[in-house]
Amino acid sequence: MAITLTYNGTVANLGDRLIWTDEFGQSPVKQVKGSSTTGALLVHVGVLQAGRQITLDGVDSKAWIPRSLCESLELWAALPDITLTLVLRGVARQVMFDHERGAFEATPIWLLADGEQTPDEVFLPILRLFTTNAF
């Protein structure tokens, strides 16, 4: 099943080989512990409304994407405060690029001399996103 990222009606097909590296181990519960002025334990617990990290890693899975797609993703990542629709495992999620964690990067498969690059040259991507809707 293809993984897609959509912005303003433009769909980027990311293939089907990206690995969601932080899918498990994130709690939907936020807990803050502290103490009162008398030393009593205070615990505040709530369910996160959004903010789940989604890291899509193509390095280990060798999920190649073309330079042309890298350029589009780089442009989208440079736009502040945009919301995109990520379809992953058949589920649509509203996401934003996570700039604190690096947003987007891509490593070339082959090291080419300047001027040898083409739109079809392939890269290994890493996308760092977070959800803006329900956890």
Image (cartoon, rainbow, N blue to C red):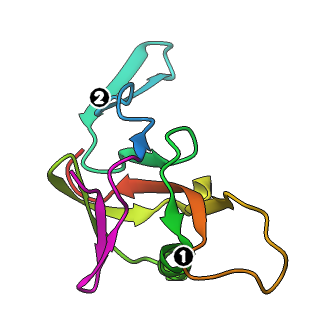
Q: Amino acid at mark 2?
A: Val
Q: Which mark is first along the chain, 1 or 2?
A: 2
Query: Residue drawn at (51%, 23%), measured in percent from left and top?
Result: 37
Query: Residue drawn at (67%, 58%), measured in percent from left and top?
Result: 107
Q: Position of residue 16 (x, y in %)?
A: 32, 51
Residue range highlighted in magenta: 1-17
- The residue closer to the viewer here, 22 or 113, is 113
- The residue closer to the viewer here, 106 or 100, is 106
Q: Nearer the viewer, mark 2 or mark 1?
A: 1
Residue 115 is left or right of residue 81, and the answer is right
Residue for badge 1: 120
Secondary structure beneath dot 2 equals: strand
- The residue closer to the viewer here, 54 or 114, is 114
Q: Position of residue 9 (x, y in %)?
A: 23, 85
Image quadrant in which the C terminus is located? top left
Query: Residue drawn at (58%, 45%), measured in percent from left and top?
Result: 59
Say if the magenta span includes residue 75: no
Query: Residue drawn at (42%, 41%), measured in percent from left and top?
Result: 19
Numbered badge on residue 61: none
> Is 65 located above or below residue 117 in the figure?
above
> Is 70 located above or below residue 62 in the figure?
below
Q: Position of residue 134 (x, y in %)?
A: 20, 50
Total numbered circles: 2
Secondary structure beneath dot 1 equals: loop
Determine whether label 2 and label 1 are within 8 Å by CB: no
Residue for badge 2: 45
> Is 102 located above or below residue 54 in the figure?
below
